[in-house]
Image (tube, rainbow, N blue to C red):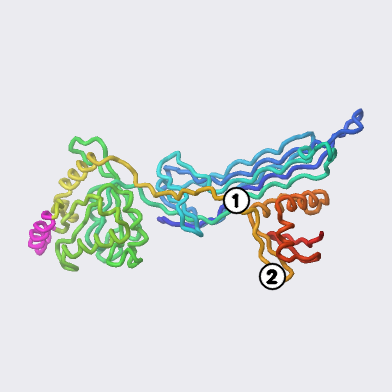
Amino acid sequence: MFVDRAKIFVKAGDGGNGVVAFRREKYVPRGGPNGGDGGRGGDVVIAVDSDLSTLMDFKYRVHYKAKRGEHGQGSNKIGRSAENLIINVPPGTVIKDSETGDVLADLVEAGHSFVVAKGGRGGKGNARFTSSIHRAPDFAEKGEPGEERWIILELKLLADVGLIGFPNAGKSTLLSRMTAASPKIADYPFTTLSPNLGVVNPGFGQDNGFVLADIPGLIEGAHEGQGLGYEFLRHVERTRVLIHVLDMSGLEREPLEGFHSINRELVKYSEKFLKKPQVIAANKIDLPEAQKNYEKTKLLLEKDGYVVIPVSGATGMGVKELTKYVGEMLAKIPKILSVEQVKEYKIVEEKPFEIKRDGQLFYVSGRTVERLVAMTDLENESAVKRLQRTFRRMGLDDELKAQGIKPGDTVKISDSEFYFVE
């Protein structure tokens, strides 16, 4: 099964907790705190595996979670950091943020990878909180939560040449003639329900073959989701040359009309297609009614600068000539992949907190305060007092008072609730 789009949830590992521990030795009556830090949680990494060609695995598994770091131990032992979770995808996979649609990464070659969710740092052990005032701190930090998000994976095939044209134009038959591929072929629209790939060996003294893709489902309105075209138009973007297959028989539509219709759909989807060179494969030339259409179509298209080559997928006529010409074209076009523009995120100074009031309930949000609460052991009185001191230093208490909070009112941060006291 060919799957070229998937939505998955990724969660990086939480950091390990710091530990509360004290040195206990026979001849050391006042051994100080020696609780170690927790280890770092594992990142979630998307990496290219050149042996893959589809996103099918993500159809059956949606949630991916990295392991958390190990907790710290006494004697200042630091917990072991967790290994990263590697998610393999085929070359040509675009990673998008599910909420915004922004492109996070475009992974096109073996070795490319992207950290899509970062693991949380380990919490500090009580040995890290020793000072001249607090000689024996009895609290430690919990591990920082790992990042989590929904992402969209989109596959864009890495083919040198794309076969485009209306359904029943003979693209699949031509693909089978030019390559060793064996696509499903039948005389009705949308026989091809997914892109087919084949490797062409041009011969004729040329050293390198090229990858040819049959792009299915293009009809009028494809850029708006009509037919199957919208799902597969993205696969044409990476190609260097397009072979536009026209049905010269004219039984379903006039060839020239079909040519312009398909090109309008391509440009409406992306103006990049204006720059892609096209070769016209005048197909089904073996049929009696095709010759008249061919002469007229060739004359008009050659005036516009197109090369028109008569072929027959059924008999093999003209296939060698088409293959040779396309191979010569590719030799002159540099093999530079069209890569998606990744959104450049600028570091914006984030407010440490925001407050929204609903009667006697005050909602406090913000990455900084939420992280502080998540890393605090709320069952430990000393840890809670440290959290309160931190809130005072960052101005949260003053801002709550400015918004009219009274003793006994509730402050909610993430899933935790606190009662306000002076």
Q: Amino acid at mark 2?
A: Asp
Q: In the figure, 255 relative to 377: above or below?
A: below
- Magenta region includes residue 288: yes
Q: Closer to the camera: disc 1 or disc 2?
A: 2
Quarter that holds the C terminus: bottom right
Q: Amino acid at mark 1?
A: Glu
Q: Residues within 10 Å of mark 1 (few under 14, many from 20)?
A: some
Q: What is the magenta segment's predominant secondary structure?
A: helix
Q: Given the current orientation, which residue lies at the most extreme top position?
A: 27
Q: Given the current orientation, which residue lies at the most extreme bottom position?
A: 359
For this rendering, which residue is in front, 387 or 205? Answer: 387
Instruction: For mark 1, give the secondary structure.
Output: loop
Q: Percent position (x, y) of residue 137?
A: 83, 42
For this rendering, which residue is in front, 272 or 204? Answer: 272
Residue 73 appears in the rendering: no
- Magenta region includes residue 345: no
Q: Is residue 165 left or right of residue 44?
A: left
For this rendering, which residue is in front, 162 or 175? Answer: 162
The residues tagged by marks 1 and 2 sit, at their Cα atoms, a distance apart of 29 Å
Dot 1 or dot 2: first in sequence order is 1
Q: Percent position (x, y) of residue 207?
A: 24, 35
Q: Which mark is residue 147?
A: 1
> Magenta part of the protein: which range?
285-303
Residue drawn at 32 percent across, 60 percent down: 269
Residue 357 appears in the rendering: yes
Q: Percent position (x, y) of residue 2?
A: 40, 55
Determine which residue is flagged by label 2: 358
Residue drawn at 65 percent across, 43 percent down: 121
Q: In the figure, 238 relative to 286: above or below?
A: above
Q: Residues within 10 Å of mark 2 (few under 14, many from 20)?
A: few
Q: Is residue 90 left or right of residue 348?
A: left
